[in-house]
Amino acid sequence: MKRDRIVFQLLVILIFSAGSLRANAEGFSKSVQKKIDKAVEASFPHQNLLLDDLKVVKLDFFRYQGISNVRLSLLKKQEDVEGYACFASSKGKNDFFDYMVLFNKKLEIQKVVVLIYRSSYGGEIMSKNWLKQFIGKGRGEEMEFGTDIDGISGATISAPAITKGVKAMSLLLSELKANGSL
């Protein structure tokens, strides 16, 4: 009887932990994982997507200036690709910051989230209202800082840096799709 109770408790724990790790992004801290899960769930509600890292071979990342530590993942529901998650770092005034851009199947931006901001200056780019400017844009179009993307007070270096990075990731995904790598 006690053994049955323990087995039942373990099953309950497994069921709840599986639901809380929807995006399944490995290699991130728990706090960053929570941000990723929340953003994926908000952009792709009720789909229980998994992140499947994309192995990119022979890609000239130097063509995409302003981004480093690039990681691309497919957002999959079983075997169907529902979108893409792109992770990168860009340099603010003093330090690098890490962010994620979620794209739908049409390569339109669904959400931009700053995952880790290390500097004491420029953190204004983490504002959800400011980041909403990127939603719906794709293929690097209409992403010029100061023209299509408004600046934000207090982030004179970080704001153009993330804009350049988001545009670079958008162009990168477009290139991968055009050459059949997605």
Image (cartoon, rainbow, N blue to C red):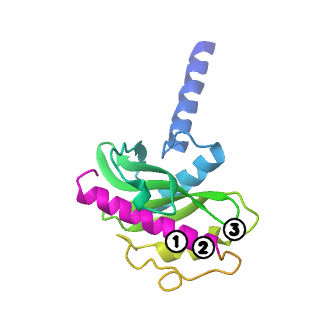
Report the amino acid beneath label 2.
Ala
The residue located at (60%, 73%) in the rendering is 159
Q: Could you tell me what secondary structure mostly forms the magenta stretch?
A: helix
Secondary element under disc 3, as helix, strand or loop, is: helix
Q: Are marks 1 and 2 in contact (CB under 8 Å)?
A: yes
> Where are the magenta residues, as a range?
157-182
Q: Is residue 161 magenta?
A: yes
Q: Are marks 2 and 3 in contact (CB under 8 Å)?
A: no
Report the amino acid beneath label 3.
Gly
Mark-to-mark CA distance, 1 and 2: 6 Å
The quadrant in which residue 35 appears is bottom right
Pointer 1: residues within 10 angstroms few (<14), some, or many (20+)?
many
Which sits in the foreground, 153 or 62? 62
Report the amino acid beneath label 1.
Thr
Residue 44 seen in the current view: no
Sequence-earlier tag: 1 or 3 = 3
The quadrant in which residue 20 appears is top right
Which label sits on residue 108? Answer: none
Q: Which residue is mark 2?
A: 159
The residue located at (37%, 53%) in the rendering is 60
Q: Position of residue 39 (x, y in %)?
A: 52, 58
Secondary element under disc 2, as helix, strand or loop, is: helix
Mark-to-mark CA distance, 2 and 3: 9 Å
Q: Is residue 129 above or below residue 117?
A: below
Q: Position of residue 94 (x, y in %)?
A: 70, 62
Q: Which residue is mark 3?
A: 123
The residue located at (35%, 51%) in the rendering is 59
- Left or right, residue 57 beside residue 28: left
Which label sits on residue 163? Answer: 1
Mark-to-mark CA distance, 1 and 3: 14 Å
Sequence-earlier tag: 2 or 3 = 3
